[in-house]
Amino acid sequence: MSFWETHKNALAVVGLGLFVLLVGYFTVIRPASAASETCRQAIAEKEKKLADYYPELKDPNNVHRMQTIQDVQEACRTRHDEYGRQLKQLKDRLRFPFEDFEYIQKLKSQERPGIYLSSTYTDVKFQLHKTAMDRNVPEMLERDWMGFSPPAKSHLVYKTPADVPAVRPAGSEPAVIAEEELRKLCLAEQVTQLAINAGISRILTVKPLGKTEEAATRLRANPAYKQPGGKEPEKIVEEYPNRFIFNYPVSAAMIGSPEAVMKFFHSVRQEKRFLVISSFRIVSREDRELSADVVGRMRPGDVFVEISAACMDFKEGETKYAPPVPQYVLPTGPIGA
């Protein structure tokens, strides 16, 4: 038998394979190679334009790759930790330093908070009067300038809200929390001391008011947001369920020269003091709104000042309510389902 007759089937298979390869090359591989070359050229042009903004693109040895999910998660954790650190620093700068007052620290060790509150109140008033006497202005503080006083019945005073009995006798008087009363004393002492340091000639009243509580808020993505210019905003305000801001307002009335008043305002608006001034009123000695009693205490050139300010504190406690669960809409199109 001839060579052809012996190997014709194998040669036929080889010929068919070469034909398929040629057809595939000219119909698929060659056009795809041309398209990929076009894409490479387009990428090279874009890379040249971006090189001015991203210097790392100019390094020929630099390997560019997309971030993995692990990389993105690690970057998010790093940013979250950094934002948490910055938030803690900001809170430390904004909050009023109640813990810096020694009588606040000693409250925990007191067995009779009512008596301790009364004695501390008396001591603070005495020290402030002594400071005024040392500056040769004994008339600086009015007799009852501090606009509150401890309760006469010491048995009604408890250290903290947690110490108040869950069940109390019917008709009993409201409980007094020593911790909150001492915080009021801190505010009154701070305002009085700042006024003395500023050179205010007379402090008529310094009255701490009841604290107010509000939930801290944050912005989050609005699940109902659809497109710019629509009715729904892109971000909505959401309350934290376990983070709270406590505002401690205080009002004061005093008399002094305009220079002393401005110095007092400047000292009040400092970190760890009274960052919020809600209102103030400055009236000259010639104003008819003032009573004769107040005018009699004023020297020529003095002004009468009323101010309402507030400091703040922050607390993270137990969740008071369940936060709303966002209802996200799945995306559609080539990326979504």
Image: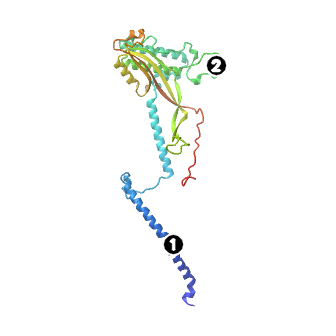
Disc 2 packing (10 Å; few <14; some 14–19; many ≥20)? few
Q: Quadrant of residue 16?
A: bottom right
Left or right of 105 in this view: 168: right
Where residue 257 appears, as percent x and y from the top left, is 35, 16
Disc 1 packing (10 Å; few <14; some 14–19; many ≥20)? few
Identify the residue under disc 2.
168
Colour mode? Answer: rainbow
Residue 161 vertical placement versus 147 (above, below): below
Question: Quick one: 186 or 280, which is closer to the camera?
Answer: 280
Q: Residue at x 43, y 64 (%)?
A: 38
3D distance between C-alphas at marks 1 and 2: 93 Å
Residue 209 vertical placement versus 93 (above, below): above
Tell me which numbered mark, 1 or 2, is placed earlier along the sequence: 1
Residue 67 vertical placement versus 184 (above, below): below
- The residue tagged with tag 2: helix, strand or loop? loop
For badge 1, the amino acid type reads Gly
For badge 2, the amino acid type reads Arg
Outermost residue, bottom direction? 1
Residue 59 vertical placement versus 293 (above, below): below
Question: Quick one: 170 or 51, which is closer to the camera?
Answer: 51
Where residue 327 appears, as percent x and y from the top left, is 59, 43
Left or right of 292 in this view: 28: right
Question: Quick one: 331 or 5, which is closer to the camera?
Answer: 331
Q: Residue at x 53, y 20 (%)?
A: 178
Where residue 53 appears, as percent x and y from the top left, is 37, 51
Q: Quadrant of residue 278?
A: top left
Badge number at residue 24: 1
Badge number at residue 117: none
- The residue tagged with tag 1: helix, strand or loop? helix
Q: Quadrant of the N terminus?
A: bottom right
Number of numbered discs overlaid on the protein picture = 2
